[in-house]
Amino acid sequence: MYKPQDIKVLVIDDELSISQFLTLGLQNEGYNVESAQDGISGVNKAKEFQPHIAIVDVMMPGMNGFEVCSMLKTTQNIAIIMLTAKDEVDDRVKGLTLGADDYMVKPFSFQELLARIHARIRDHYPQLMNELAIGSFRIDDARKEIAYKDSVLTLSTTEYGLLKYLVINHGIVHSKAKILDRVWGYDFGGQENIVEVYVRSIREKLGDADHTIIRTIRGSGYMVDLG
């Protein structure tokens, strides 16, 4: 079963405040985290630490994030999320061309970073994701089962996909339109109200009568709150 403590994350950022914030936040989520304050130290740390995923700032003195990305991708099997203070298309294209798996522009939501880490781990290390423990949820992708507080829920295929999406991306508000796109698919021709129907059914199965697990954010959408 994939648990955060099984995942090694390397933070490479020359801004000490950001590096400390990310390191502490990820450690609080249970991840095994190391950090480096410059590119050369980051590459050397990666050789010793052998992280599953690296969060790399682009704008660093000496060896910049692009060079770090290129070296890490050449020598290791690693997922890379690049950080930049500039929302420049050329920078994003350059990073992705060098092998970066994702890109985030500062300032960013920590919850969104967590969701992107989950996504990159899922894409890069699928063998780790057959079972995933998040809060009181356990997701077994091989069996297409979700357990809540050790009780397996009886879910339809669509309910499984919806709850899995919300749980993996917990702490982030998702609009009905976004949920339809990610769970039903972009070519789904139905109405957004179908999301309400499925959320209502899942809440009943979770015993979530007061909507504290799957929260409704009025005018915005739904969010799973792990408490």
Image: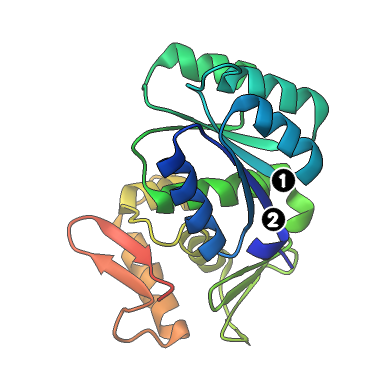
Q: Is residue 43 left or right of residue 162?
A: right
Height in image: 121 above or below 67? below
* Residue pictured at 47% horizontal, 21% vertical: 59
Name the residue tied to disc 2: 7
Height in image: 119 above or below 222? above
Height in image: 149 above or below 117? below
- Secondary structure under tag 1 reads loop
Q: Is residue 172 left or right of residue 68?
A: left
* Residue pictured at 62% horizontal, 59% vertical: 31
What's the image's color scheme?
rainbow
| Residue 23 spot, x, y in % from top left | 53, 51
| Residue 15 spot, x, y in % from top left | 44, 34
* Residue pictured at 35% horizontal, 75% vertical: 200
Label 1 with label 2: CB-CB less than 8 Å:
yes
Q: Nearer the viewer, residue 113 or 132?
A: 113
Can you say which quadrant of the picture contains the N terminus? bottom right
Could you tell me the amino acid type at mark 1?
A: His
Q: Residues within 10 Å of mark 2 (few under 14, many from 20)?
A: some
